[in-house]
Image (tube, rainbow, N blue to C red):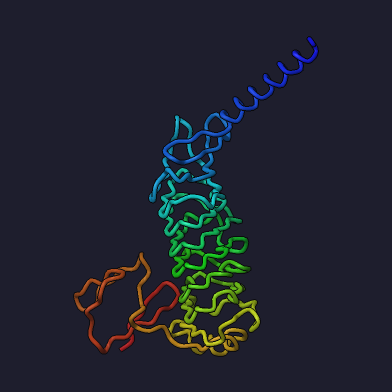
Amino acid sequence: MKRTIFLLLLCLISLTMSSWEYQREYIVSNGVKYRICNSEELEVVAILPEAGLSVEIPIFVDDMRVSSLRIDDVNTTCEHLTIPSSIQEFYGISSVSLKTIEIDPKARIAPSAIFTCPSLRSISISNDNLPGTDMYDWRFKNCVSLTEIKLPSKLTSINGYVFNGCQSLEHLTLPASLESFGAFLDGCPNLTTITCLAQRPPEIAVSEKSYSNSTIILYVPFASLEAYRSAEGWNQLFSIQPIPKSEFQAPSDVRFTIEEYLMHPNEEAHVASSLKFSPSDAEYTCQF
């Protein structure tokens, strides 16, 4: 009898300690569940339904810094998520309700991050969000509603299944720094146009089997038109056209004066119709 009571007491103590340890391992604040990594850092692991439609992750919770995020919770009702600068390891997120993600420019996304968000419509990724200069292990997995992806301007390589399954993606802009492109696009049936800002045709490592839509139009800088049309790979996969004038934008750090008009990036330039602008690496020249 005493042995039985003793064993029952041990079981009760064990259950109590397990419950206490579980409470120490996780905390919940304003509908967001965090895992305690150590005495100073937290990791976001879930957005609970009571958090509401819009959630802004704080930098600190209970005097502990929120430093990483790994959400795998399909039951959330959150539609907009704001990621703070304190997140230095963004491993990925899975959510059926999330429509927009706002990532602080100083937050860092892990090289193998996976986004599984079928309702996600757009996402913007800055240079500082990316730890390196290539996108290979990244995946926008089954992001069937994604129509716009703003990529970092420092990217040199895009490969693998980064965009595979983005069924609503209609246009893709590749940065001027790109040197290699091997992303499979066979899961993007609505992709009709790609704009590549690179002056020199990047090395391409894909075949016709990588594309479900053979009518994709590739827009390239006017000065590089012939180079792309003669580049093996590009000329076999796409119909290559010069970038329309309406899409021309100067780099964000370019500012120059012509005929007493100061032209700022992304603003309309009032210049004589006889002037034409053609990019040459980082410089812009006037041709009369």
Percent x, y for residue 192?
Answer: 48, 82
- Direction from residue 135 to residue 242 in the image, left or right: left
Tell me which residue sits at (49%, 83%) in the image.
218
The answer to which image quadrant residue 148 occupies is bottom left
Percent x, y for residue 243?
Answer: 41, 83
Q: How many marks?
A: 0
Tell me which residue sits at (63%, 84%) in the image.
208
Farthest front residue? 1
- Direction from residue 47 to residue 206 in the image, left or right: right
Percent x, y for residue 27?
Answer: 51, 33
Tell me which residue sits at (41%, 41%) in the image.
58
Quadrant of the image for the C terminus? bottom left
The answer to which image quadrant residue 57 occupies is top left
Residue situated in front as seen by the camera: 27 or 275: 27
In this rendering, the answer to whether 208 lies above or below 122 is: below
Quadrant of the image for the N terminus? top right
Residue situated in front as seen by the camera: 141 or 163: 141
Farthest top residue? 2
Residue situated in front as seen by the camera: 36 or 78: 78
The answer to which image quadrant residue 43 occupies is top right
Tell me which residue sits at (19%, 75%) in the image.
260
In this rendering, the answer to whether 194 lies above or below 140 is: below
Percent x, y for residue 268?
Answer: 25, 75
- Direction from residue 96 to residue 259 in the image, left or right: left
- Direction from residue 100 to residue 5 in the image, left or right: right
